[in-house]
Amino acid sequence: MGERSVESVIALLANTLGDATAREVVEREVRLAGLGRTVSDEDAVAILTKIEQGGGPSGLGARLAKLRLQRAATGVSSAAVAAVAATGAKTPRIAVSQLVSMFTPALGVEKATETIRTALTALDVRGETITLDDAAVCLERLGRQGGVIATVARFAKARLLLATG
């Protein structure tokens, strides 16, 4: 494992929580731990674990960020997950219709379907079922769009984490 800036840890959480909240919770844990502006990957995982233990949206965001950090530190990528899937190994999957249903109450069926399909197409993800990693990446991307779609995407990602957790 290597080292990273505190800003990179904040960025891991910002996709889920927004910049201000991510900065607040990470900076608080860095201060409490007496760390500097550069932290080891182990310290970054410890920071995210503390945030995760606090529960709520910040805890769920920290859980996802910790998984991404650990995946990056160990060199396991979405491409590796796809390679495992190609060999016939079982990887957890979710129906695209489940993602659409998470957006339907706020957007309606037609707009929800269009939103999810457009995001998946941009990621070059096809099929009626997708890996949980692809679903998380899709929701992260939608979470950066702003507005109602971003709000729904953040809640959908939290629901996805709870369901698979």
Image (spheres, rainbow, N blue to C red):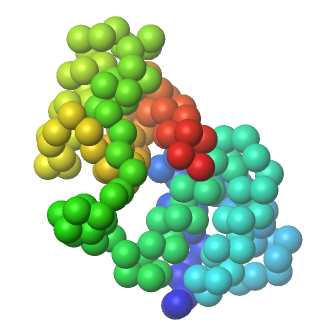
Residue 23 higher or lower than 154, as above or below: below
Q: Is residue 147 in view from this perspective?
A: no
Image coordinates for residue 57, horizontal then vertical, percent: 66, 41
Judged left or right of residue 126, residue 61 is right
Judged left or right of residue 111, residue 22 is right
Image coordinates for residue 34, horizontal then vertical, percent: 82, 80
Image coordinates for residue 120, horizontal then vertical, percent: 21, 40
Q: Residue at x 22, y 62 (%)?
A: 88
Q: Residue at x 28, y 44 (%)?
A: 130
Image coordinates for residue 72, horizontal then vertical, percent: 42, 75
In which quarter of the view is residue 44 placed? bottom right
Q: Residue at x 77, y 64 (%)?
A: 50
Judged left or right of residue 19, residue 39 is right
Q: Please identify the residue farthest to the right as the structure is shown.
A: 32
Q: Nearer the viewer, residue 88 or 112?
A: 88
In which quarter of the view is residue 30 placed? bottom right
Q: Residue at x 71, y 70 (%)?
A: 47
Q: Is residue 162 in view from this perspective?
A: yes
Residue 65 higher or lower than 117, as above or below: below
